[in-house]
Image (tube, rainbow, N blue to C red):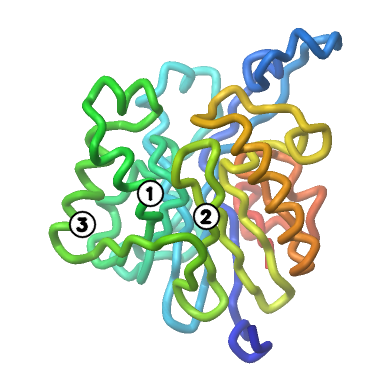
């Protein structure tokens, strides 16, 4: 990607919930590791790329009070996070849905003018599922209905594999957590960043090989993590796990106007 194509692109992460979780719940077969359990802070986020062609969101978050764990979390409404970023939802140009899980695809209706982008494999998998399969797979039926409504309006673009959404923002197929999970490579003014979303929830998956508890294909997830590591090294793009609170310490990032916005590039 030519440097001029990335000029001026800024990338922000908006943290809309901070949940206390245990490692024994987050990681598959944690007991076999033979180490003490402990609690950690698990962030729930979406990302905003400020591009010359408009604002492009990566995922949309969801309404936290819908979840049983809401009383144990610190959270703020997604519209409030958008407002703090200076983003008018009606002016958002595009929304990249990395996958259809409830915490990543819960506010599609907020963006009536945006073009949605998703992997064809992800869309077809969930579109053919019955309600029980959706809920057991962490997909909220009404969220899927909102995506399908956008499709009926001609606002859904399905991609196959690696696809450049606009110059400097590229979707990369990264299956395993879900059948059509995507990662997103963003070439910012300060360098490329690789948003792993839920292909890599937490740094332990990348550093220690621990498996997250939720996946449709565990071995495929392992292969995806290896391929994203290779892509990260090849592009010189730091990996951004989807739910890790340590992003702001590990990356050349800085806190933004408020402590729940992280400027990644």
Residue of label 3 = 150
Q: Check whether the beta carbons of the residues at disc 1 and disc 2 lie within 8 A of each other.
A: yes
Taking the image as shown, residue 135 lies to the left or right of residue 262, namely left
Taking the image as shown, residue 59 lies to the left or right of residue 30, namely left
> In the image, residue 199 lies at what x, y percent?
59, 43
CA gap between label 1 and label 2 equals 9 Å
138 is higher (above) or lower (below) than 125: above
Taking the image as shown, residue 143 lies to the left or right of residue 82, namely left
Q: Quadrant of the N terminus?
A: bottom right
Secondary structure at numbered mark 3? helix
Q: What crowding class fits label 3: few (fewer than 14 Cα within 10 Å), some (14-19), or many (20 or more)?
A: many
**Residue 198 falls in which quadrant of the image?**
top right
Instruction: Name the outermost residue toward the bottom.
Output: 4
Q: What crowding class fits label 2: few (fewer than 14 Cα within 10 Å), some (14-19), or many (20 or more)?
A: many
Q: Earlier in the sequence, mark 1 or mark 2?
A: 1
Q: Check whether the beta carbons of the residues at disc 3 and disc 2 lie within 8 A of each other.
A: no
Q: Quadrant of the C terminus?
A: bottom right
Residue of label 2 = 173
127 is higher (above) or lower (below) than 170: above
> In the image, residue 158 lies at what x, y percent?
33, 60
CA gap between label 3 and label 1 equals 17 Å
Q: Nearer the viewer, residue 128 or 249?
A: 128
Residue of label 1 = 121
């Amino acid at each position: 990607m030519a440097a001029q194509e990335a000029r001026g692109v800024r990338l922000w992460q908006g943290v809309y919930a901070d949940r206390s979780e245990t490692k024994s719940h987050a990681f598959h077969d944690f007991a076999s590791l033979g180490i003490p359990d402990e609690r950690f802070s698990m962030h729930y986020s979406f990302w905003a790329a400020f591009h010359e062609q408009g604002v492009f969101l990566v995922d949309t978050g969801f309404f936290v009070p819908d979840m049983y764990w809401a009383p144990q979390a610190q959270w703020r409404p997604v519209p409030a996070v958008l407002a703090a970023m200076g983003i008018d939802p009606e002016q958002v140009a595009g929304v990249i849905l990395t996958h259809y899980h409830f915490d990543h695809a819960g506010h599609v209706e907020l963006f009536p003018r945006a073009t949605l982008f998703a992997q064809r494999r992800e869309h077809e998998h969930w579109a053919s599922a019955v309600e029980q399969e959706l809920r057991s797979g962490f997909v909220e039926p009404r969220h899927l209905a909102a995506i399908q409504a956008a499709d009926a309006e001609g606002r859904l673009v399905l991609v196959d594999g690696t696809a450049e959404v606009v110059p400097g923002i590229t979707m990369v197929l990264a299956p395993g957590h879900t059948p059509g999970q995507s990662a997103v490579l963003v070439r910012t003014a300060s360098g490329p960043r690789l948003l792993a979303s839920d292909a890599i929830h937490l740094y332990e998956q990348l550093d220690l090989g621990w498996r997250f508890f939720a996946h449709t294909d565990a071995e495929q997830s392992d292969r995806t993590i290896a391929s994203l590591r290779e892509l990260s090294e090849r592009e010189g793009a730091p990996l951004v796990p989807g739910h890790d609170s340590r992003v702001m310490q590990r990356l050349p990032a800085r806190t933004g106007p408020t402590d729940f916005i992280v400027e990644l590039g």
